[in-house]
Image: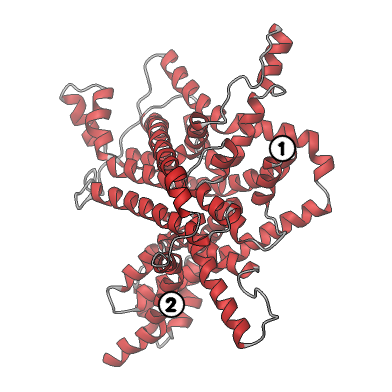
Amino acid sequence: MAKKTTYWWNKWTGGAIVILLLVLTPVFTILVKLFDKPGEHWRHIASNLLPSYFANSFLLLLGVGFFTFLIGVSMAWLVSVYDFPGRKYFEWLLILPLAFPSYMMAYSYVGILEYTGPVQAFFRNNFDIHFKGAIVDIMNMPGAIFILSISLFPYVYVICRASFTRQSSAMQEAAFLLGSNRMRMFTKIALPMARPAVAGGIALVGMEVLNDYGTVKYFGVDTFTSGIFRAWFSFGDINTAIYLSAILTVIVLALIWLENFQRGSRNWNAGSGGSRPALRIRPKYKSTRRLYTALCLTVLLISFIFPLMQLFYWVSLTWQNVVDSEFGILIFRSFSLAIGSAVAIAVISIFLLYAIRLSPLKWTKHIARTASLGYAIPGAVIAVGVMIPMMGLDRTINWAVSDNMGMILSGTLFILVVAYIVRFMAVGYNAIDAGFQKTGATVNEVARSLGASPLRTLWKIDLPLIKNSIAGAVLLAFVDILKELPLTLILRPFNFHTLATKAFDMATNEMIAESANASLVVVLTGVIPIIVLNNMISRKK
């Protein structure tokens, strides 16, 4: 038995630890570099810019957290509890804003509200009403809160909808027998029971807010992410960028700790697994049912349909000048990079999960769980943390082999793929873990008792059983990588563009209409996994 334990340690647990070290490299790098002297621009940034970074980041977190809670919880409650026209469609249509990167949403709304946009054109043509400049100036802090809220609320919506749907009809009936109305049942029973879901959704929103660069850069709002870019690219001060990254990492870790702390060890389950799900209520009055339909439709229009229509309008004006062979190469490069990175994430996730299943060491599950925490770290921080050790490896290789070799790792796509793996490991890991949970460990035990090796068991039994989960993991990681902006901007090779960086580059150079072509490809690609996953869920139901 002792030999078996050693065998698993060498083959699987050791590999899992290597992957863990790779994923934690950015954090280790930043912690080590903090002991270096601060950069020459640190004093200037600390005294003049750091207070605004703190204030703006806090206001964004507070504002976006409040509005995503308001929109996400209310929409989840409506589609989970009430029956009204269009409910079964809104149930998944309200997830679509996740396909719209927030910075692309920002470009769309600036176009909608500007002088030549459809809103002002409507007032001019029909009522002869003229405005000076944009009808509403959103290129400020309130505008950034609005854009981030309507693009991120589905994080709260999806998790809360699942929580409300699972709550049993027994509680519903008990509340009504005690004389409670629907609103009181929501505030006193349903919402408190959904507290972990709400907190988890808002925590995810907070991490995305801190990771955002495109929106805050375009709107001129200084945050820690924009400060990291300024320190690195404008000042050329890596040490100052590291100090800012460390502060941002601490804020993110504090968010994670707060979410875990409020959850604690309490049990928030609705009851036994056999409890009947809550029945949807059909409002008595037709006007009420129409009101609920109108509310869901309004949220969908504002958060997805209007900005998507603006992109289509811009594309109709500019596609002949933009869509050419070079644009086709841009799509091919972006898709190839995203697919390759997504497949690498899936392979590593399978290895980690299989290591947990085979290893007799109980603490291996903590290794895998820690290895999937990269999603919580902002892309700019990961980029800084990965770039520095890669540059050190390049210097070592040049010293050992030849000074003329140049940037072998840090100037190539290799470093970008490594950073994507670190950033999006959790996406692939969680999707494949769901598949492994369904198969159970019994099949492995039976196969090993028949003399099959672990690798043969994985190849012949486990992988065919979880192929749908693997496909889902690759698809989700692919879409997230395709949308990623700050990490790609920092680590991409010279003159290399993805669809995301091309759209951002064009928009910042006042070519917003032209940028819509790349943006539309990203958005429509992001819609695919939402439709696929909705169909899978519908079939299971």
Q: Quadrant of the N terminus?
A: bottom left
Location of mark 1 (residue)? 510
Sequence-wise, the earlier of marks 2 and 1 is: 2
Going by the numbered disc 2, the residue's amino acid type is Val
Image coords of residue 22 (percent x, y): 46, 72
Front in this rendered view, residue 165 or 33: 33
Location of mark 2 (residue)? 18
In the rendered image, the residue lying farthest to the bottom is 3
Q: CA distance from mark 2 to mark 1?
A: 45 Å
Horizontally, is 275 left or right of 409 in the view? left
Relative vertical location of residue 410 with respect to residue 38 in this rendering, above or below:
below
Residue occupying image coordinates x 55% and y 72%: 390
User: Which structural element holds mark 1?
Assistant: loop
Image coords of residue 378 (percent x, y): 47, 54
User: Which structural element holds mark 2?
Assistant: helix
Front in this rendered view, residue 405 or 12: 405
Image coords of residue 226 (percent x, y): 53, 47
Residue occupying image coordinates x 32% and y 51%: 254
